[in-house]
């Protein structure tokens, strides 16, 4: 145990975590030159295309220092706030963290929120100043920020560059000297925390764990604490570039277990593995429960693919523990699932992964939150979907969920952030200066207002500096109405939404205009209308694709042309009665991005 070090890498988006991880792996010869590619740990196509890390990745390295052999377990984590749940799980499996700060940008919001997560778990922090080879680096200023933030000495900040490999040796030495070896009792009953899992179609479910106490050997009978199910450890091993089987793993090690589990419900991330014969008395504290921010319906395009979609979502949930889902149905789309996501990027990524990894074509409805509806008969109904709203004549009033939002920002952005929150129907509760330059703002605002683009806007007006956290505080009465979108008089329940009375007209107008651009032209005219109840408040028309039937009339009497046009008009009218309009998936997503 003395020679084991478990650490993760935390940073804001694009501060160079994955590139630095590449250098560490090359320096310790974990990856051969033949297998090496940039961002070697990002093994999903999506991660490479977008240049972001979506999953945390664990890998083991061997390192020699002063004649002693050390085993280093590295976990590379995502930087985007939508995947902060991944980070919180990685931190639970480590004793130390590399805090990477971009020398050209300084400390940013996600750096701070990830740092607080690490400090809450008593991790040893090693500050690293990355991108020192850039001409625009400002090491002195950024070092001041780091010293202010974590109170370390200036000398302990390591200057490095993931691109050139500068400072890699110092980082490895600091990991060995500064990060404590894992604590635990090898003689105690087995206690291992599951911090991630993946689905393999040949081997079943593979769980990744970190051993807190005890020893696990291949072939032993083990039990999962929360589900109470018992299995045989067919294969255990460590995670290198691939999976390497081992006979036994001791306290403090990070590894994987394959026990032929086929159903995804039996593995819960955050569960504890123990022996069947000599079980531990209590489970390890897992992680905080995930709080979905955005709810949207996900429906298969072909209705008979419903069961396939269910199993795809279950397999995806294994690999992405922050996804939640439950069955629901819709008039226009049939059976599907109501899914909870951590944000709009998370929703986009889940949709992409369903398409790529499971070949599932899905339609996603407008994201929203759950409401409490009170009828005139004094009944309360909870509605997740605007189409479930009772008839307006029975409606008494609607209550919507309210949150307490805490925003930490630099003081220069206060005005813009306050304006944004007021626009989103927020009420300022408190303003508190943490330092001369950093402010914490507390707002009460409706959850529905932060679902769409609040976070993106907050990021852009604060140049990525504002960090945002929220806690639900209950429901409040609100003047909400249901906005319906109709195509040729047919309501599209997937596009209907509950909006505040004051915003209904502008939103209806924007949605009809946006759909006009996105719906392909047909042989007949398509009327796109936004309505409240029976009152139409906005309309756009997609013009018909017309063939020039009068082309053969050159000269002659006008009645000849008129006759041909009338004939065409009748054909169009007939076609409109039988034709139906396909709304492309892109239209659903684009409508969500409306300002």
Image (cartoon, rainbow, N blue to C red):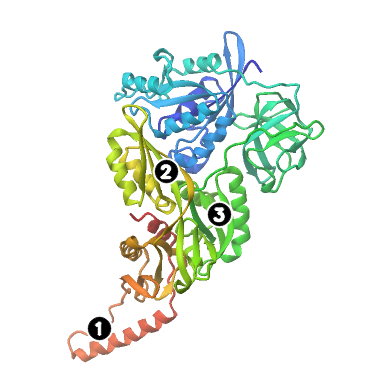
Q: Is residue 175 left or right of residue 426?
A: right
Instruction: State the residue in front, 343 or 138.
Output: 343
Q: Nearer the viewer, mark 3 or mark 2?
A: 2
The vertical placement of 145 against 343, above or below, is above
Question: Separation of disc 2 and disc 1 at Cα?
Answer: 67 Å
Q: Are marks 2 and 1 in contact (CB under 8 Å)?
A: no
**Total labels drawn:** 3
Circle 3 residue: 359
Q: Which residue is drawn at 74% across and 25% down?
A: 215
Q: In which quarter of the image is the N terminus?
A: top right
Residue density around tag 3, few if under 14, some if 14–19, many if 20 or more, within 10 Å = few
Considering only order in the chain, which callout, 2 or 3, is on the residue closer to the N terminus?
3
Circle 2 residue: 405
Q: Which residue lies furthest to the top in this view?
A: 66
Q: Which of marks 2 and 1 is in front?
A: 2
Q: Which of marks 1 and 3 is in front?
A: 3
Q: Circle 3 sits in a helix, a strand or a loop, which is it?
A: loop
Residue density around tag 2, few if under 14, some if 14–19, many if 20 or more, within 10 Å = many
Question: Separation of disc 1 and disc 3 at Cα?
Answer: 49 Å
Circle 1 residue: 552
Q: Picture coordinates of residue 121 (x, y %)?
A: 55, 28
- Whether residue 80 is visible here, answered yes or no, is yes
Considering only order in the chain, which callout, 3 or 1, is on the residue closer to the N terminus?
3
The vertical placement of 180 against 446, above or below, is above
């Amino acid at each position: 145990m003395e020679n084991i070090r478990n650490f993760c890498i935390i940073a804001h988006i694009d501060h160079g975590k994955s590139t630095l991880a590449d250098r560490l792996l090359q320096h310790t010869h974990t990856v051969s030159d033949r297998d090496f590619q940039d961002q070697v740990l990002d093994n999903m196509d999506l991660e490479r295309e977008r240049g972001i890390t979506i999953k945390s990745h664990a890998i083991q390295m061997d390192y020699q220092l002063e004649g002693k052999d050390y085993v280093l377990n590295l976990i590379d984590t995502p930087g985007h706030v939508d995947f902060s749940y991944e980070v919180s799980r990685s931190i639970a499996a480590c004793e130390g963290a590399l805090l990477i700060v971009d020398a050209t940008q300084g400390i940013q919001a996600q750096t701070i929120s990830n740092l607080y997560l690490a400090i809450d778990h008593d991790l040893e922090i090693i500050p690293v100043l990355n991108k020192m080879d850039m001409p625009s680096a400002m090491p002195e200023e950024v070092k001041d920020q780091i010293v202010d933030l974590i109170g370390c000495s200036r000398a302990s900040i390591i200057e490095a560059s993931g691109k050139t490999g500068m400072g890699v040796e110092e980082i490895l030495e600091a990991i060995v000297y500064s990060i404590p070896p894992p604590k635990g009792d090898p003689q105690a009953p087995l206690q291992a925390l599951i911090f991630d899992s993946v689905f393999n179609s040949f081997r079943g479910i593979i769980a990744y764990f970190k051993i807190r106490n005890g020893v696990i050997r291949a072939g032993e009978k083990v039990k999962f604490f929360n589900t109470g199910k018992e299995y045989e450890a067919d294969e255990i091993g460590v995670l290198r570039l691939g999976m390497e089987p081992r006979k036994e793993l001791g306290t403090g090690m990070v590894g994987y277990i394959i026990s032929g589990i086929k159903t995804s419900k039996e593995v819960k991330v955050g569960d504890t593995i123990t022996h069947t014969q000599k079980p531990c008395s209590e489970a390890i504290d897992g992680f905080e429960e995930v709080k979905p921010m955005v709810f949207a319906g996900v429906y298969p395009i072909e209705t008979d693919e419903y069961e396939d979609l269910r199993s795809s979502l279950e397999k995806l949930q294994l690999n992405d523990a922050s996804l939640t889902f439950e069955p629901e149905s819709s008039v226009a789309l049939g059976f599907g699932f109501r899914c909870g996501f951590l944000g709009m990027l998370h929703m986009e990524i889940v949709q992409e992964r369903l398409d790529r990894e499971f070949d599932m074509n899905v339609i996603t409805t407008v994201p929203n939150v759950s409401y409490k509806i009170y009828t005139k008969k004094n009944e309360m109904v909870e509605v997740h979907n605007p189409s479930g709203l009772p008839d307006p004549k029975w409606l008494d009033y609607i209550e919507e969920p309210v949150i307490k939002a805490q925003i930490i920002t630099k003081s220069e952005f206060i005005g813009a952030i306050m304006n944004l929150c007021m626009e989103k129907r927020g009420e300022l509760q408190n303003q508190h200066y943490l330092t001369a330059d950093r402010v914490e703002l507390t707002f009460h605002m409706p959850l529905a207002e932060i679902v769409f683009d609040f976070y993106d806007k907050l990021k852009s007006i604060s140049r990525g500096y504002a960090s945002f956290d929220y806690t639900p505080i209950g429901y409040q009465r609100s003047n909400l109405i249901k906005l319906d979108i109709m195509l040729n008089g047919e309501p599209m329940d997937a596009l209907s939404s509950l909006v505040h009375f004051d915003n209904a007209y502008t939103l209806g107008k924007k949605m009809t205009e946006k759909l006009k651009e996105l719906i392909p032209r047909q042989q007949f005219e398509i009327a796109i209308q936004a309505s409240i109840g029976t009152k139409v408040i906005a309309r756009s028309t997609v013009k018909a694709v017309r063939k020039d039937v009068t082309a053969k009339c050159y000269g002659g009497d006008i009645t000849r042309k008129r006759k041909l046009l009338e004939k065409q008009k009748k054909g169009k009218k007939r076609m409109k009665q039988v034709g139906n309009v396909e709304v492309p998936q892109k239209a659903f997503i684009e409508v969500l991005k409306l300002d």
